[in-house]
Amino acid sequence: MNPVRNSNSSKNKNMRKEPYISNGMNRRDFLKRCGAVAAGGFVLSNRAFEVRLGAKYPNVLFVFSDAHRARTLGCYGDEQMMSPNFDKFAGEGMQFNNCVSNAPLCVPMRISNMTGLLGCKTGVYLNGHADRFDYGKHKIVGRTFKEAGYVCGYIGKWHMGYVNTVPGDPRRFGFDDFWRVTGNENGTGNHEYFDWSVWTGKDSQLQRTGFRPDGMVEFAEEFLTINKDKRFCLYLAFGPPHGPLTPDAKNDHYQGYVPPPNVPEESRETASDKLARYAGLIEGLDDAFGNLMNILKKLGLEKDTIVVYTSDHGSMQKSHNLGAKSKPYDESLRVPFLIRWPGRIKAGAEIDMPFSVVDFFPTMAGLAGLEVPKNLSGKDFSDLILGRDGAQQQEAVYLTMHSSDVVPAPGWRGIKTSRYTYVRTVNGPWLLFDDTNDPYQMNNLVQTEPALVAKFDDMTIALMQKHGDHW
């Protein structure tokens, strides 16, 4: 069965703002038209030769946020969320419906994004572990693209170690050509959104005011303008919607937001308030992302640039009466993953195959025609994205959280398939949800589906062994 399908429904019926490219069509008409457009280009046996058609490798613009759960976007079904720019972008490219954070916590997932490796390979299981990472040992996104001749820049939240560095320092991961990084000098995160600063080099900072995502886009415009005639790889890391939940005033209008049904009655008022401000931050990201796409188009870079939007993990916001991340539930695990490459990636397509943060690096390298490093935890799904015959797929992705406030060390392990989420602890099976028929995960099937439990438990243990993970 073909895993790529066209979207044919309007998921966000409450769009207030004009998207970044307006042509008089509503989202339903837009997706209908996009669904009829097949990806262009030639299919040749030599991928590197193929992507170089047009005399250059594609540019890469990888945009990701912090703590943005997939559920809270119009294109993922939230009719309360006003996100026309993300929704428009989804219609122009491809949407992964089951992209998950393997270990839903900031530092482990950011380093997994950079390396394609799980925490059991990097040594980074939890926040505060960045100093355990061997910066010079592993293949990393920035160094891989830099060695291929790309100009590499990083803008925004780092949270992967020391940030007061010079170009060439291995702690920069190869992002040596443009450095506009937020964070405290010791490498901890920083979430000041209206009075903030960025590191630009050794002992050098810029102070800024105003909503931080807008400032990040201004830095991106600087980078793109300088390097528009070069091959570039730019990573832009927004801070929101991670707390504090203080949206820009123009986006703070979601009062009365109705929480999902998995928020218990005693927490619904609190959840409504939190989700209102969380949605306001996401709408602010939507505005900033729309401006970024306008800049890309203005500079003539739209056609030759692979653009991604995703996040490092989600956020519970009182679903199951839980907060924050590191939880084995949909709101914490599942993140948006939207990707566009005009003429190459089929517009309006959706993929239900499970996909995860460790797959990001090998897939981006594959799409760019670069040699994908061996022995990664993740896989290269560029053939699937480009619609090639015989493209590899996977039935499940591995989940591993070594400690959280719901399960202390040694934590929980599990798998995510396109339909099910299964989780166990060291003591045995814990959770099994049918995400298709029970999307809010309100009915734990561990006691009623022994055959599925046995199957998924065997798969989980096999993946633990494959990846060298242990209790």
Image (cartoon, helix red, strand yellow):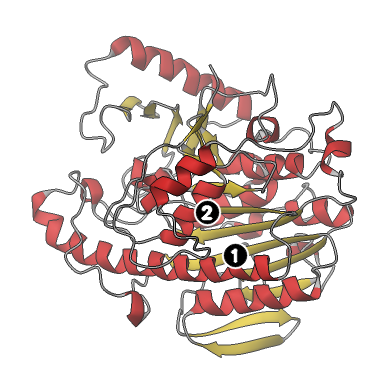
Task: Determine the residue located farthest toward the front in the rendered image.
Answer: 24
Instruction: Pinpoint residue 142: horizontal percent, then vertical percent.
Output: 76, 57
Amino acid at pointer 1: Met
Instruction: Pinpoint residue 318: horizontal percent, then vertical percent.
Output: 24, 54
Dot 2: what SS? helix
Q: Can residue 311 be spotted in the picture?
A: no
Foreground pick, 89 / 451:
89
Q: Residue at x 29, y 69 (%)?
A: 277
Is residue 468 left or right of 167 when viewed as pictured?
left
Earlier in the chain: of badge 1 and badge 2, it is 2
Q: Residue at x 86, y 43 (%)?
A: 53
Task: Name the quadrant containing residue 8.
Answer: top left
Dot 1: what SS? helix
Q: Which mark is residue 1?
A: none
* Vertical position of residue 427 compared to residue 261: above or below: above
Q: Give the class, few, some or many, for how many residues have Cα within 10 Å of label 1's Cα (few <14, many ≥20).
A: some
Q: Which mark is residue 293?
A: 1
Q: Which residue is mark 2?
A: 89
Foreground pick, 471 / 171:
171
* Vertical position of residue 403 compared to residue 292: above or below: above
CB-based contact (under 8 Å), mark 1 and mark 2: yes
Is residue 446 left or right of 412 when viewed as pictured?
left
Amino acid at pointer 2: Phe
Q: Can residue 291 be spotted in the picture?
A: yes
Q: Residue at x 69, y 67 (%)?
A: 154
Q: Residue at x 47, y 31 (%)?
A: 352
